[in-house]
Image (spheres, rainbow, N blue to C red):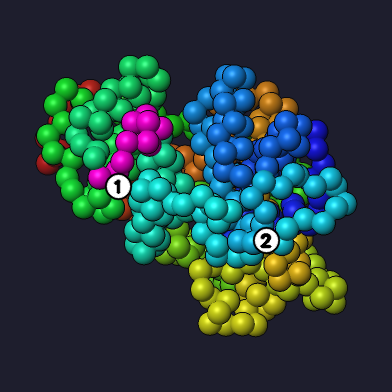
Amino acid sequence: MLKVPPAVMQKFDWLLVKSDILPGEYPAYRKWLRFYLDFCKKYQHGYADPASFSLFVEKLKSKNQDSFQLEQARAAVGLYYSGLGKNEPDNPTVPDAGQAVPEVEEEKGAYAAGRKKTGWDLSIETLANEIKVRHYSKKTLKSYTLWAEKLRYFVKDKEPEALDAEDVKAFLTFLAVKKKVSASSQNQAFNALLFYFRQVLKKEFGQIDGVVRAKRKPYIPVVLSRQEIDRVTVNLGYPYHLIVKLLYGCGLRLSECMKLRVHNFNFDQGILTIHDGKGKKDRALPLPQVIRDDLENQLYQVTRQHEADLKAGYAGVFMPDRLEVKYKNAPKELIWQWFFPAKELTFVADANEYRRYHLHETHVQKAIRRAVQKSRIPKRATAHTFRHSFASHLLAANYDIRTIQELLGHSDVKTTMIYTHTIKSKTIKESKSPLDL
């Protein structure tokens, strides 16, 4: 396997950070870049020639790679192309490790190495802009653009303006019959393409007969008992045991817990404030007093690490949206530091500086999986199970369901009602008048 020159990988990492790609996807994108450059070197194809990618795709297909992997490979190579300078030779060979590599430039657009943007490239770019202007989450951006790409491959690059209801009908039928996707995936595809048609193509689906939108079956969440939760936390090391206690003690989503910063904690009032939760909603939660000492110790550890980072000359933490432009010193301020910081700094090649990201979700998920297995709990427990347990235990303790709805951040009480199925029902069979109760 070709060893990618460090300068190329550093530039590619910067492009990843600047993109809307989720950090959890970075390793896969780096892998596809290595595979593509190795392919070009092995078969003497130009690494900046778009024709090389077509050959690369054919090679992947011969190895029975699925459509998702093909799309991810295409996105990775497209991102790599976007960083190539305009003055590159038409058909250079991939340099060996240590040799000079082309400088990566920002904002060159997709396929800056010579390939013109197609109608699909422009429409998907417009789709991304429409999602961003509405401040939808990165996960929504990722899923909607992915479904648009899947439709593109299904219709074999038929021009977007020529798409109609029959194309959508055939695609949704293909997903249900051939791919056997779940009801949630089918509905997500429908919603993504509906948004694509309305906001990008500026036309309606029209009547789609013959395709029934799948209905999700009522799902009863997995709930752990208090004893089982204690068994899991005992088998977790630092800082994962504290993360799980917050997930359960405050009913947090994993993403909300990972994005906590120092300023979210108000120890004087015993309040934890969640900013920009699901649906961009804020909510306030009571801090569990039993873990107050652990939380204050974690704050002390974060403060010490922050002071060490500043002495080492690091550039601060990654900031949301455009806050860094508005508050230039904020990344180095203590209140903006992650409450659960990553163990290592991230190098930003373009700025030639190091920044700190929060602990990644996958690390927590793996730690919980190992702890559950070690605890020998015969349940399919994940990080979200602790949120389910939070709601179920409060409901079992006779807390008002409206209160639980607010604590969970649900928009509709119907979503919270699912937890009525996770606790024992108490039925009084003897009939009485309410006057006699």
Residue 247 is at least partly visible in this image: no
From the image, tell me which residue sits under label 1.
196
Nearest to viewer (mark 1 / mark 2): 2
Tell me how far mark 1 sits from mark 2, CA to CA: 31 Å
Query: Which residue is located at x 55 percent, y 53 percent?
Result: 114
Front in this rendered view, residue 36 or 338: 36
Residue 380, position as x, y percentages in the image: 55, 26
Q: Which residue is tagged 2?
A: 104
Is residue 261 on the magenta stretch? Answer: no
State which tag comes first along the sequence, 1 or 2: 2
Residue 104 in which image quadrant: bottom right
- In this rendered view, identify the residue nearer to me: 388 or 54: 54
Proximity of marks 1 and 2: CB atoms separated by less than 8 Å = no
Residue 303 position within the rendered picture, expressed as x and y whole percent measured from the top left:
76, 71
Q: Amino acid at mark 1?
A: Tyr
Q: Nearer the viewer, residue 126 or 115?
A: 115
Please provide the residue range marked out in magenta. Answer: 151-161
Picture layout, residue 335 above or below residue 392: below
Residue 105 is situated, as x and y percent measured from the top left of the image, at 64, 64
Q: What residue occupies the far top of the structure in this picture?
A: 178
Identify the image quadrant of residue 434: top left
